């Protein structure tokens, strides 16, 4: 009886020892494979990034391609690690397929963002460094990712916008064209001479070297409002100088009009009181 028990214990001990050696060795190999795979993924991604920089590839595409290569290598590494424990590749593919279907149904909105991100990268309605707006989202593009686009607002606040919102709405790109037109409505008094005011404002525009000669700047009468004759000042400048030129012209308009005895009137309303109303007020 004692001999039988000893044999059983010996068999169990041998089994545990062999299993420990087998799975322990596999675990060590798996950890080593995982570490090497993660290290190689970073090295490959950095190498690709350097190649893209030397090739002057668009900055919009570089981070996306880098991320794709990084996670592709890591996915292959994970499959190799599972193979160390005897998991069949076909089984892994089947599990990944089923998981992808389930995840796709659960994350429809996220997949829409990915699809929108791919369309943004392919069609390029905007690129890194451009200032865009779709009404509710506005800022300078810093990075276009697969899920969201990173922007910096005019006040310096960082904004992450889902790609789907940018793709499925009308988008204004303020930086795409090299030139931009300044439109500035200005009101003068009905007592002033519009021809004199127009000539003075036109000379103001022509004196600024930042304003383009073609198309030529011009000033026209656009409306007769309640308390002012409305003029519209139009001039073209480079997009990079747009705000500097606009603010500079706006600052000089009042002094320019005052120099030719023209004024910017306050809104006024005339009241005519009839004799009947005067009698009621006197009573």
Image (tube, rainbow, N blue to C red):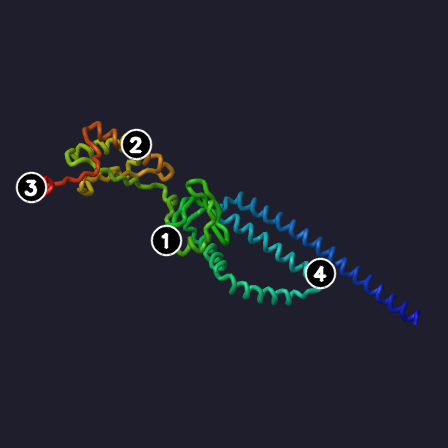
Q: Give how far apart the Cα atoms at labels 1 and 4 are.
A: 51 Å
**Which residue is the extreme one toward the front?**
283
User: Do tag 4 and tag 2 residues touch (Cβ < 8 Å)?
Assistant: no
Residue 10 location, x and y as percent?
A: 87, 65
Q: Which residue is mark 1?
A: 170
**Residue 240: mark in rendering:** none
Instruction: Tell me: 275 left or right of 156.
Output: left
Which residue is at a point 31% across and 31% down the rendered structure image?
Answer: 209
Q: Give how far apart the Cα atoms at labels 4 and 3 are.
A: 105 Å
Please state which of the two labelled residues, at mark 4 or mark 3, is closer to the viewer: 3
| Disc with the residue nearer the chain's start (3 vs 1) | 1
Decide: is 44 above or below 16: above
**Residue 84: mark in rendering:** 4
- Tag 1, which secondary structure? loop
Q: Give how far apart the Cα atoms at labels 2 and 1 are.
A: 33 Å
User: Do tag 3 and tag 1 residues touch (Cβ < 8 Å)?
Assistant: no
| Disc with the residue nearer the chain's start (4 vs 2) | 4
């Amino acid at each position: 009886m004692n001999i039988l028990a000893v044999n059983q214990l010996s068999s169990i001990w041998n089994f545990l020892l062999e299993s420990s050696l087998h799975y322990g060795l596999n675990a060590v190999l798996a950890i080593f494979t995982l570490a090497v795979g993660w290290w190689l993924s970073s090295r490959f991604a950095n190498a690709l990034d350097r190649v893209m920089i030397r090739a002057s590839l668009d900055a919009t595409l570089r981070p996306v391609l880098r991320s794709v290569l990084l996670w592709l290598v890591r996915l292959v590494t994970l499959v190799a690690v599972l193979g160390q424990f005897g998991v069949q590749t076909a089984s892994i593919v089947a599990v990944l397929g089923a998981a992808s279907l389930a995840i796709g149904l659960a994350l429809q909105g996220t997949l829409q963002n990915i699809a929108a991100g791919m369309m943004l990268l392919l069609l390029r309605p905007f690129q890194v460094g451009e200032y865009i707006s779709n009404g509710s989202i506005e800022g300078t593009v810093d990075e276009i990712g697969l899920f969201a686009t990173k922007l910096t607002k005019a006040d310096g606040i960082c904004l992450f916008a889902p790609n789907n919102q940018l793709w499925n709405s009308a988008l204004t790109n303020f930086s795409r064209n090299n030139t931009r037109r300044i439109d500035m409505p200005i009101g003068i008094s009905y007592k002033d001479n519009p021809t004199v005011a127009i000539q003075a404002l036109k000379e103001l525009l022509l004196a600024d070297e930042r304003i383009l000669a073609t198309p030529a700047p011009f000033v026209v009468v656009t409306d007769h409002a309640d308390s002012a004759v409305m003029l519209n000042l139009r001039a073209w400048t480079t997009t990079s100088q747009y705000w500097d030129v606009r603010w500079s012209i706006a600052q000089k308009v009042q002094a320019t009009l005052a120099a030719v005895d023209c004024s910017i009137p306050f809104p006024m309303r005339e009241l005519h009181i009839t004799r009947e109303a005067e009698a009621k007020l006197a009573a």
